[in-house]
Image: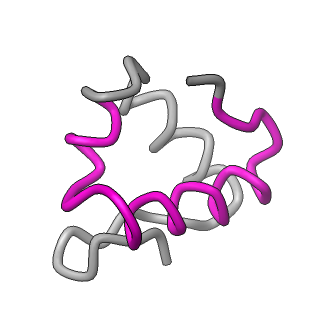
Amino acid sequence: MKIPEDPMILVSFLNTQLRDFYPSLEEFCSANQCNMQEILQKLESIGYAYDKNQNRFR
């Protein structure tokens, strides 16, 4: 799956995917062959961090 490049679109896309289809970011990345560290770094650059307890970026 091609994920959005723009960080603002990416955070919205990921939160929707995590809410609707995946119980964790790890499972999303595994299922879609994404690099989790790259995602975390990209979203951290705009002030978002992954919250495991809520399974979303905040």
Q: Is residue 44 magenta?
A: no
Q: Nearer the viewer, residue 44 or 52?
A: 52
Q: Is residue 45 left or right of residue 23?
A: right
Above or below, 48 relative to 29: below
Could you tell whether 40 is left or right of 31 in the image? right
Number of marks in picture? 0
Residue at left 19%, top 61%? Answer: 23
- Against 50, residue 26 (above or below) is above
Q: Is residue 15 left or right of residue 37?
A: right
Could you tell whether 49 is left or right of 2 in the image?
left
The kind of secondary structure the magenta stretch mainly shows is helix
Where's residue 45, x and y in %? Answer: 66, 50
**Residue that protrudes farthest toward the front in the picture:** 21
Q: Residue at x 32, y 41 (%)?
A: 28
| Nearer the observer, 34 or 32 | 32
Magenta-colored span: 3-29
Q: Position of residue 6 (x, y in %)?
A: 82, 43
Q: Is residue 40 above or below residue 16?
A: above
> Please, is residue 45 above or below residue 36 in the view?
below
Residue 39 place in picture, x, y as percent: 50, 37
State which quadrant residue 26 falls in.
top left
Q: Residue at x 62, y 66 (%)?
A: 47
Q: Residue at x 46, y 69 (%)?
A: 57
Specify the color scheme.
one colour
User: Would you say residue 24 sits in the magenta stretch?
Assistant: yes
Please provide percent x and percent y for residue 24: 22, 56
Which quadrant is home to the N terminus? top right
